[in-house]
Image (cartoon, grey):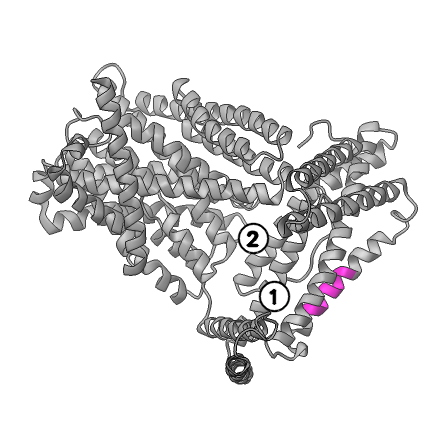
Amino acid sequence: MEHNLIIANEIIIITLLLVAIIASMTLRHLKMPYSIGLVIIGYAFSEFVVPHIEALKSIGPYFPAADIILYIFLPPLIFESAIAVNTRLLNRNLFPVLCLAIFGVIISAGIIGYMISWYFAIPLLFALLFGALISSTDPVAVISIFKEVGVPKRLQILVEGESLLNDACSIIMFQLVLLLISRPLLKNDLNFLETSALFTSQLLTSFIGGILIGVVGGIILRTILRKTPLHSHIHQTATLVAAYLTYLLGDELGFSGVIAVVACGFITAQAASDWIGPDRREELNRFWEYIGFLANSLIFLLVGITIASLEDLSLLIKGGILGIFFLIGAVLLARLVPVIGTFAIFNRFTKHKVPFSYQAICFWGGLRGAVAIALVLSIPLSLPFRDLIIAFSILTVLFTIFVEGMTIGPLIQFLGLGQSKLLRTFHQLYGELVTFRAAQSSLENANIRGIIDSAILDEHIRKHKEKSHNIEQMVREFWKNVHQNPDRMSVIRLFQLEALHYEQKQYRQLYDNGLILPPVYTELQYQITIREDFIQSGNIYTDIRLYAPGSRYKIKFCKFLKRSFPDSKMLNTYQKRIDIHLIFASIAIYIASSATIEYLEKLAKWVCLNPAEISEIIGFYKKIKQKALIHLTSEQVIGTQNLIYVSGYLAERTAGAGIIQVITHHIEEGIGDEKTLGHMIDGFIKEKNKARKKVFKSCGDEILP
C-alpha cells in the first residue's frame, strides 16, 4: 500500500513537470504571459485530462497538501530572490522599503479585511486572513519588464526589496490570523488592545528570531563556501540545504522562517562573491534560477488545478460583476494608501526624494503571485470560507498579472522611465550592424575557401558587405537626425551607460583575479550603481569619490580621534586599513578608467560616431584617471610600507591570474591533460584565497569576510 502511494506521488510529480515543459515551449510561441498560461493549462489539465487517466486521479481536489506548499515551495522561492538582491543599494533605500514591507502590509491587510467583511458579510477574521495573504507582492513579472525597458536601479530596488521583505510580514500576519481563528482569543479574555499587543510582540519576536537563525545559517554556509571554493556541487547542495533548514528551524522555534531564509540568502550572496570564482558563481546563480523557475511553474499549475476543484462559490457569484469590481477596488485602494503615505513621509525628511513617477510604478507594479497562491493553498481543508478565500485570491492574482502586468510596460514608457523611441531605434540599427559585419568577417576568414565553390563564397561575401555598407549609411543618417531631435541626450546617455557597464566589468575582472579586496570591490560597485541610477533618471553624474569602504562619517570621526590620541594602537590600525584600501581603490580606478577610455574610442568608430560627440564622457574618465594617479603618486603613498606591500601582492596575483588564464585556455583547446591542468588551477585559486586572507590580517580585520 505504501509502495503504491509513493509510486502514485511520483507519477503526479513527473506529470506536472512534463506539463510545465510543454507549457513553457508552447507559451513562448503564443507570446502569452507565462503565469497566466500556466494557470489556464493547469485548469484544462485538471478538468479534461485527470478524470480520464486512472493513474492521475490521486491528484484529486485541493492537491497538494497544505504543508507541501509552505515547506517545499516557499523556501527556494524566497532564497532565490534574496541572493539576487543588491544589498548595498537596498540599505540606501531601507526606510521606505521597510515601511512598505511592514506597515504597508499591516495597513493593506486591515483595509482589505474590513472592506471585504462589510461587503460580503463574512466574519472579520476570515476577511483579514485574505487581506494578510494577498498583501504580499511578487516582482517576478515586473522585474523582467524593468530589465527590458531599462528603468532606474533605485526604482527596481524599491519594488524588489519591498517584495522580498513583505513576503515575511505577510506570512507572519497570515499565520497569526490563522492562530486567532483556531484559538478565538478575541472571544475570551483578551480585548482589542491586548490582542494588538500580542500581535506586535509576535511580529517582533518572529523578525528578530528569524534574523538570528538566518545569520547563524549564513555564517556556517559562508564557512563552507570559503573552505570549498572549487566544488560547484557542494555549493549548490549546501545552499539548497541552508534554504530549507533555516526555514524549518525558524518555523519550528516559533520565529519567521521567511526572515531566516532572507538573512541567510543575503550573507550567502556576499560569500559567493568573496570566495568562489566567477565560473562557479555563475553556476550557482543558474542553479537557483532553475529552482525558482521550477517552483513558480508548479505553483501556477496548481492554481489552475485548484480552480477546477472549487465548489462553494455562491457568495462570490451572488456578488456578481459588482462584487468582483469591489474586490479588485478594495485591493487597489489598500495598495495605494500605504504607497502614497510612505513616500509622502519619506520625502519630507530626505534630499533624495522619490518622484511621483516612481510612486505610480510602485503602486501599479504591486503584482500578486506565487507567495499569495502558496499561502491560500495552505489553508486547512476544514476552515470555513476556504473556497471563497481561494476564489478571491485567484481573481486578484489573475487581475494583477494579466491587467497590471500587461500595462506596466506602457505606463513606464508614458512616465518617461524607460528607453526612448530614439534609443530603441539605435539598438535596432546597432544589432543589424553587428550582425552583418560579423557575417562578413566570418566568411572572409573562413577555412572553407578552396574547398567549396569560390564564386559562391565571394558572392555571399559581396552581399553581406553590401548589407553592412547600407546599414552604415542608415546609422550615419540616424546621427544626423539625432542632432535635430530634442531627445538626443537619451542617446548620449546610452554611451554613458555603456561606459559605466564596461567600467563595472573591469572591476569584476580585477576582483575575480584577486587584484582588489572584497570591501573595495563592493564600494566601487556601489558607486557604479549610484551613478547608473543618476544617468537613467536623466541626470549627469559629476564625479567619483576616492575614499575607503565604509561610512565617510566614521572615517572622519576616527581621524578626529587620532588627532587627540595619536598613539592609539586601534586608531593606527584602522588608519592603516583605510590607507591600504585607498591604494587598492586608486589602482582599480586607474586601470578601469584607462580601459574604458580605449573602449569608448573604439565604440564610437564602430557605430560611425564622431568621437567629439562623446568627448565629455571621455573627458570624465580622463579626469578620474588623473585623480587616481595623483593619489598614487602623492607623498602619503610614495615610498610607504603600504605601497610596497600592495605592490608585492599585486605583482604576485597578476602572475597567478595570468597562469590561470593560460591553463584555462589550454583546457578549452584540448591541449595537455585536462585533469592535471585542472588540479594546477585549483592550487592557484587556493593560493589566491590565502593571499587575500593575509591582506585582510594586515589591514587589522579580526574577522575575515
Which residue is the extreme one toward the top?
Answer: 189
Number of disc labels: 2
Q: Which residue is mark 1?
A: 496
SS state under label 1: helix
Which of labels 2 and 1 is toward the front?
1
Identify the residue at image location x=78%, y=56%.
628
Q: Quadrant of the C terminus?
A: top right
Residue 426 position in % (x across, y down): 50, 74
Q: Which residue is mark 2?
A: 351
580 over 223 or under it: above or below: below
429 over 49 or under it: above or below: below
State left or right for residue 523 relative to residue 133. right
Q: Is residue 33 visible?
A: no
Label 2 with label 1: CB-CB less than 8 Å: no
Q: Is residue 624 magenta?
A: yes
Magenta highlight: main SS: helix
SS state under label 2: loop
365 over 52 or under it: above or below: below
Identify the residue at image location x=34%, y=36%.
106
Category of crowding for the residue at label 1, using alpha-carbon neighbours closer than 10 angstroms: few (below 14), some (14–19), many (at least 20): many
Q: CA distance from mark 2 to mark 1?
A: 24 Å
Q: Foreground: 120 or 312?
A: 312
Residues drawn in magenta: 617-625
Which residue is the extreme one toward the right?
Answer: 639
Where residue 693 sits, quadrant-wise, is top right
Where residue 298 sits, quadrant-wise, is top left
Q: Amino acid at mark 2?
A: Lys
Category of crowding for the residue at label 2, using alpha-carbon neighbours closer than 10 angstroms: few (below 14), some (14–19), many (at least 20): few
Residue 86 position in % (x across, y down): 54, 45
Where residue 198 sits, quadrant-wise, is top left
Q: Amino acid at mark 1?
A: Gln
